[in-house]
Image: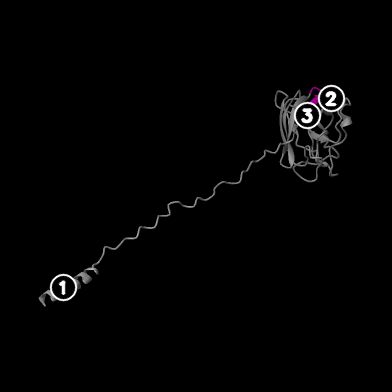
Amino acid sequence: MKYFSLVAIALLMAGCGGKEDAAPTADAPAPAGDSPSVANTTEPETTSSAEATAGAAVQLSPTQGNTANGGLKITAAGAGVKISGMIQGLKPDSEFGFHFHEKGDCSAPDATSAGAHFNPGNQQHGNPQAQPHHAGDMLNVKSDAQGVAEVSVDNADVSLQTGQPNDILGKALVLHAKPDDYKTQPSGDSGDRIACGVVAIQTN
């Protein structure tokens, strides 16, 4: 009988032993999201295809009995053009009317073959910084004590190599003996034409 009781107790203890707390199995931490989504920072390629700005040149030659001459460069600048360069052989410390003319012809000894001021908009002559004025009207050129003028003039009313009515390609650029007064019609009382040149595509 004692034997039976001991067996029963042993079996009972074995059953309870199975309920012992087992060490909790710590779940492996979820892999940290250390591969952040990389923002696509590749910007669209702005291959600013440097628009080939049209370039032209004018060789100013003196008219009969005069000495003014020089080389000028004309480049497209925004909707207009920029004229830059040097003119020499001028009366020192003076001002000279400076205009685009309607014809590309400097063949006459006094350059009258270049016609009137370039005026595609059919306006009255005037100050280029006010209205109205011809498209070809520009500020006077000024010479220094040596009779040399450094030219840097902007003209927003004309274009270069556009095929538009205000395109100056093939037109004449004329320098006058006196300053333009910006009011006398039709050309500002700027006197004789002392130098003339035709706007032509620059070839390098």
Residue behind mark 2:
63
Q: What are the residue bounds of the magenta stretch?
A: 57-67
Q: From this view, report whether residue 1 is shown above or below residue 125.
A: below
Instruction: Check if mark 1's residue and mark 3's residue have beta carbons within 8 Å.
Output: no
Q: Which mark is residue 187?
A: none
Q: Which mark is residue 7?
A: 1
Could you tell me if residue 155 is visible in this image? no
- Horizontally, residue 157 falls left or right of residue 24, namely right
Q: Mark 2 or mark 3, which is nearer to you?
A: 3
Which numbered disc, 2 or 3, marks the residue that appears first in the sequence?
Answer: 3
Mark 3 neighbour density, 10 Å: few (under 14) some (14–19) many (20 or more): many
Residue 60 covered by magenta stretch: yes
Q: Residue at x 74, y 35 (%)?
A: 54
106 or 189: which is nearer to us? 106
Q: Which residue, as the protein is rendered here, is positioned at the far bottom? A: 1
Q: Which mark is residue 58?
A: 3
Mark 1 neighbour density, 10 Å: few (under 14) some (14–19) many (20 or more): few
Where in the figure is residue 136, as x and y percent of width and height?
80, 38
Task: Say what secondary structure mark 3 lies in.
Answer: strand
- Horizontally, residue 25 falls left or right of residue 41, namely left
Where in the figure is residue 11, as x and y percent of width and height?
19, 72
Q: Residue at x 22, y 71 (%)?
A: 15
Quarter of the picture containing the N terminus is: bottom left
Where in the figure is residue 37, as x and y percent of width and height?
49, 52
Instruction: Check if mark 1's residue and mark 2's residue have beta carbons within 8 Å.
Output: no
Residue 33 covered by magenta stretch: no
Task: Say what secondary structure mark 2 lies in.
Answer: loop
Q: Which amino acid does the dot numbered 2 rest on?
A: Thr
Could you tell me if residue 130 is visible in this image? yes
